[in-house]
Amino acid sequence: MKDMLEHLSTLREQIKKCEQLRDTAKSSIKRAAFDRIVAHYKVLAAELEYAISQAEKE
């Protein structure tokens, strides 16, 4: 469980970093790329949160 919580924390940090990069990007291509990465990381974080909640029920 600890490993999943640590990875969730890492994902959340990556989301914040990518959001900062997206928001400061001058290129629309770069903004779009980081926006897609943010969306992808958020899906991964949600899946990990779900797995953690299921593991807690066991």
Image: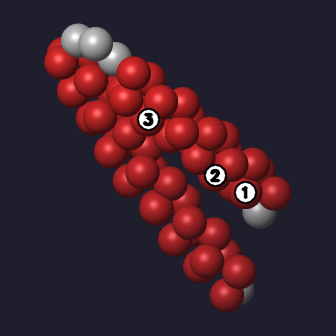
- Height in image: 6 above or below 36? below
- Residue marked by disc 2: 8
**The N terminus, quarter of image:** bottom right
- Residue marked by disc 3: 19
Question: Sequence-wise, which precedes: disc 3 or disc 2?
Answer: 2
Q: CA distance from mark 3 to mark 1?
A: 21 Å
Question: Neighbour class for label 1 at 10 Å: few (<14), some, many (≥20)?
Answer: few
What is the x, y in percent for residue 38? 38, 39
Count of numbered circles on the image: 3
**The C terminus, quarter of image:** bottom right
Which residue shows up at 46% across the image and 61% down it?
A: 47
Q: The residue tagged with tag 1: helix, strand or loop?
A: helix
Q: Which mark is residue 48?
A: none
Q: The residue tagged with tag 2: helix, strand or loop?
A: helix
| Front-most of residues 14 and 27 | 27
Question: Neighbour class for label 3 at 10 Å: few (<14), some, many (≥20)?
Answer: some
